[in-house]
Amino acid sequence: MMTEQRCRPAVTEFAARRDVDEYSPPWADFGDFFRSRKDDDSTFLIAVSRGQRTRAEWSVDQWRNAVYNVTSDLIRHGVKAGDNVAVLAHNSAETLALTFAVWLLGGCLVPLDPRDEDDRHKEILEESGARWVGVDAGPESVAQVMRSGCAEPLVVRGLMSTQRRERPSTGTDPAPLDAPALRMHTSGTSGRPKAIVLSMRSILLNCDAMQKAFGWDSKTRVLTVLPISHANGLLINSFLPWFVGGSTVLADRFSGSTFWSIAAETHATTSSIVPTVLEYLLATESSETPSPIMKEVISGSGPLRATAASEFEQRFGIRVRQLYGLSETTAVLTATPPLTGSHLEPNLRRSIGVTVPHAEVDVVDSNGASCDEGVRGEIVARGGMLMNSYDNNDSANAEAFRGGWFHTGDRGYWERGADGNRWFFLEGRLKESIVRGGLNIAPQLIDEVVTSHPLVRSAAAVPFANRWQGEEIAVFVIAAGDLTEAELLTWCAERLQPHMCPKVVIFGSEIPSTSVGKIRRNLLTQQLAGELARFWESSFRP
C-alpha cells in the first residue's frame, strides 16, 4: 500500500545555515527563476547517446516548453507541491526535464542510483514516502520499481512531447524557495543511510557562488559525463549552465575513447569531472586530440593526484582546477580560482582552492578552536548553501551542526597564498569512510560480510591509494583455518555490490584496537600502506 509523505518544512534553527553576506537569491520561487532566462533562441541542451547513436538539441525556449509538457504529465498523475518524486534513470534529456518539472511544481526530487540494489531503492522509497518514480523505458526498469511495492513508475521516455504548451497551472500557490527541493541519500560512515535535504534557495545561492568562483557565463558549454543521480552531475554540470545562461552537453555515459570527440563536435568549453575520469583520460590510448575549444576541466568529489593534474595539463594543454564540497553543502565550498599565469604554483597544486562566495570555511581543532596556518584539524563551514538537515536524524544533526559550524568530518589545513587568500588542503577523513570512484563506502559493511565467512575470526576493511578509483579496498583478515584470497573474494562478490567488493586480502594475526576492542582502522591503514603500495596501478578488471 502506497502512503503519501509531503516534504517537511525547511529547517532553519542551525546557526551554521545563516547567510554570511548580503546576497540572497532574487526569485520568489523556482518558476520565477525558470522564467527569468530570456535568451530563447540560444542553445541550452545537447543530448548525446553513444549507445543509440543519437544527438538532439534544445534551445532555451524549446527546453522550457519540454519542461512544461513533463510538468503537465506529472499533474495528471497527481503530483503537487510538497510531494517527493524519485527518479531511477540514466543520463537523458527526459530525466533532466523530469527534474526541472518536479521543481517547477514545488516538489522534492529523490535521486536513486541505478547501480544500487533493489533493497536499497526500496529502503529509500519507504523512508522518503515517494509515491512516484521516474524510470527509463523498458520492462526491467518498470519491474525494478514494481518490486519495491511502494511507488508508481513513470516512464520518462516519451514524456517530452513536441506539442506546444504554455506554463501549466498547478492549482496551488508556488512553493517558496526555502521548501525542500532535493533529497540526496548517503550511507555515511556508520552504514546507515542518511537523508540530506536541500532547499531550492540553497541550490540557487550555491549556483551564484559557483558562477563567481568558476567565471562561467553565456559562452560556457559544459560536457556532462557524470551521472545526474549525483550532486556533481546534476547541480554543477547540468543545472548551473541554466543559471549562468550557458549550455550543457548531456552524455549518456562516460567513455575515454569518445570524450574528446564529443567535446569537439559539441564545442564544449569545460567539464566538471572526478579524479577517476581524469585518470582514465590520461591512460586511454586514442587517436583523438583534445578539443581546441575546451580550456579547462574541474575535478572534485575525491582526492586528485597533483602529478596527474600536471601531467594532464602538459599532455592535453587544458588546465585543471579543483573544487571541494559535500552533498551536505549543496555542491561547492572551495575552488581553485581562475589562473592568471600559465600554471598553478607548485606548492598550491594539491590545494582544493579558496572559499567560494557566500560561504565561510575554517579548520578547527577537537575543541572547536580555529587552527593556525599549517596546523591540521577538521574542515568546517557555514552559510546559506548548507543542507536543511539530515532528515529525521537528530543525533546526526547535533553532531554535524555543533558550535555554529557544519563539521565535514574531513581533515585538512590551510596556507596563505601569495594572493593573500587562505588556500585549503584536504588530507583525508576523520570518519572511517572509503571513497572509491567518488562513492562513499562504509567499511563496517564490508567487515560484516567478511567476518560472516566460517573461516574468518575477525577482519577490517581499509582503503589504499589507487590510480583508477582514487581509493580501492583491501581487507585484513585473521583466519580460523585454511582460507585463500580467491575463496574470500568470491564470498564477498556473492554478497556485496560490485563497487564495495575488496580487491586485496592480507592475512595476519593481530588487528590494532583500542582498550574497548574498537578497531584502530587508521593505524591499520598506515601499517599496510607499504605492502599495498604495489597495487597503485592495478585496475583489478575481471
Image (tube, grey):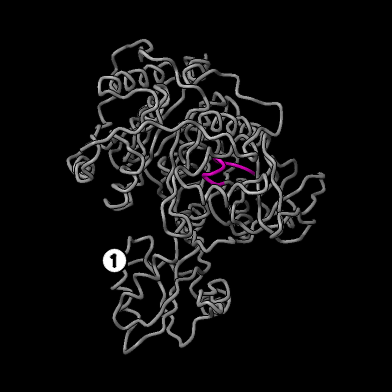
Q: Nearer the viewer, residue 397 or 253?
A: 397
Q: Nearer the viewer, residue 292 or 253?
A: 253
> Residue 459 lies in what quarter of the image?
bottom left
Q: Residue at x 39, y 22 (%)?
A: 105
Tell me where residue 439 appears, x and y as whole percent. Answer: 45, 54
| Looking at the image, residue 318 lies above or below residue 35 | below
Q: Quadrant of the C terminus?
A: bottom left
| Residue 329 shown in magenta | yes
Q: Residue at x 66, y 36 (%)?
A: 213
- Write down the residue under mark 1: 495
Q: Nearer the viewer, residue 263 or 239?
A: 239
Q: Residue at x 74, y 57 (%)?
A: 347
Instruction: Give the magenta range.
Output: 326-333
The answer to whether 498 appears left or right of 327 in the picture is: left
Q: Residues within 10 Å of mark 1 (few under 14, many from 20)?
A: few
- Examine the residues drawn in magenta and state their main secondary structure: loop
The answer to whether 108 appears left or right of 54 in the picture is: right
Q: Residue at x 33, y 30 (%)?
A: 94
| Residue 89 shown in magenta | no
Tell me where residue 412 appears, x and y as whole percent. Answer: 67, 58
Q: Quadrant of the N terminus?
A: top left
Would residue 95 be seen by someone viewing this image from the given angle?
Answer: yes
The answer to whether 29 appears left or right of 129 in the picture is: right
Tell me where residue 332 appears, x and y as whole percent. Answer: 59, 42
Tell me where residue 264 appears, x and y as whole percent. Answer: 48, 37
